[in-house]
């Protein structure tokens, strides 16, 4: 079961047990710090990182610290092969309790792009979030040139809500000020 922390500050998605879900040769399960070994090569790769909003990682310890920070106050799943090797992640963060809204982040190793893995993972985790929290809206920001993520979100039921023309990024090499803002309402 899940518990939510509700205060005057933004709430966190508090789920005590993140379920594992299998689909067509892949699975999603709770993201663990130990996944840093498998995820570091992806998080340091320039091609993999061209659409991210975080700086490329320089060593596995940085990846371990980063994952630890993600899982402390957010809800993150690892996307894995059936032999339990992490090939990406999907997470929900920046929860706004007043608007019952959260943001989704998705990242997948480039060797697995174009197989529909992320859209299936997004549909599964969105359903879990809607069924087990008070969240009513999930949103994502996507760089205009990231066509694959746009297709993934559309396939998973998201709609382009607006174009943000003054986006501020803290990522060193991210000079793009434009983002597409996608949303999905609980049905």
Image (spheres, rainbow, N blue to C red):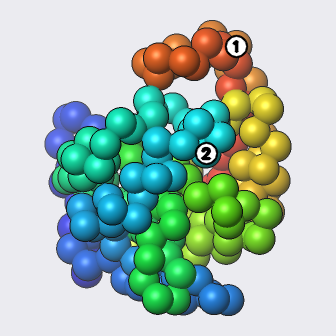
Query: How many neighbours does mark 2 have within 10 angstroms: few (below 14), some (14-19), or many (20 or more)?
Result: some
Which corner quadrant holds the N terminus?
Answer: bottom left
Q: Are marks 2 and 1 in contact (CB under 8 Å)?
A: no
The residue closer to the viewer here, 118 or 162, is 118
**Residue 36 place in picture, x, y as percent:** 32, 59
Residue drawn at (67%, 63%), measured in percent from left and top? 111
Q: Secondary structure at mark 1?
A: loop
Quadrant assignment, res 31: bottom left
Residue drawn at (68%, 66%), measured in percent from left and top? 112
**Residue 122 place in picture, x, y as percent:** 60, 65
Q: Is residue 89 left or right of residue 158?
A: left
The residue closer to the viewer here, 88 or 168, is 88
Residue 131 visible, this angle: no
**Residue 41 place in picture, x, y as percent:** 46, 53
27, above or below 125, in the image: below
Q: Give the foreground label among 2 and 1.
A: 2
Alpha carbon separation for disc pair 2 and 1: 24 Å
58, above or below 101, in the image: above
- Count of picture labels: 2
Which corner quadrant holds the C terminus?
Answer: bottom right
Quadrant assignment, res 143: top right
Q: Which residue is mark 2?
A: 48
Q: Is residue 29 left or right of residue 107?
A: left
Q: Is residue 38 left or right of residue 59?
A: right
Residue drawn at (54%, 18%), measured in percent from left and top? 173
Q: Secondary structure at mark 2?
A: helix
First-in-chain label (2 vs 1) = 2
Residue 165's tag is 1
């Amino acid at each position: 079961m899940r518990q939510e922390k509700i205060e005057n500050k933004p709430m966190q998605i508090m789920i005590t047990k993140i379920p594992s879900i299998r689909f067509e040769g892949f699975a999603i399960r709770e993201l663990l710090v130990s996944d840093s070994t498998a995820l570091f090569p992806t998080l340091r790769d320039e091609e993999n990182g061209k659409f991210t909003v975080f700086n490329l990682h320089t060593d596995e310890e940085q990846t371990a610290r980063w994952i630890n920070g993600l899982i402390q106050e957010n809800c993150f799943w690892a996307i894995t092969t059936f032999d339990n090797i992490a090939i990406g992640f999907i997470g929900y963060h920046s929860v706004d309790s007043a608007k019952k809204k959260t943001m989704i982040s998705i990242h997948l190793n480039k060797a697995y792009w174009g197989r529909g893995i992320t859209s299936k993972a997004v549909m599964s985790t969105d359903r879990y979030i809607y069924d087990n929290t008070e969240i009513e809206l999930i949103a994502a920001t996507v760089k205009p040139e990231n066509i694959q993520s746009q297709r993934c979100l559309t396939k998973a039921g998201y709609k382009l809500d607006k174009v943000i023309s003054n986006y501020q990024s803290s990522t060193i090499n991210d000079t793009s000020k434009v983002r597409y803002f996608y949303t999905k309402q609980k049905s």
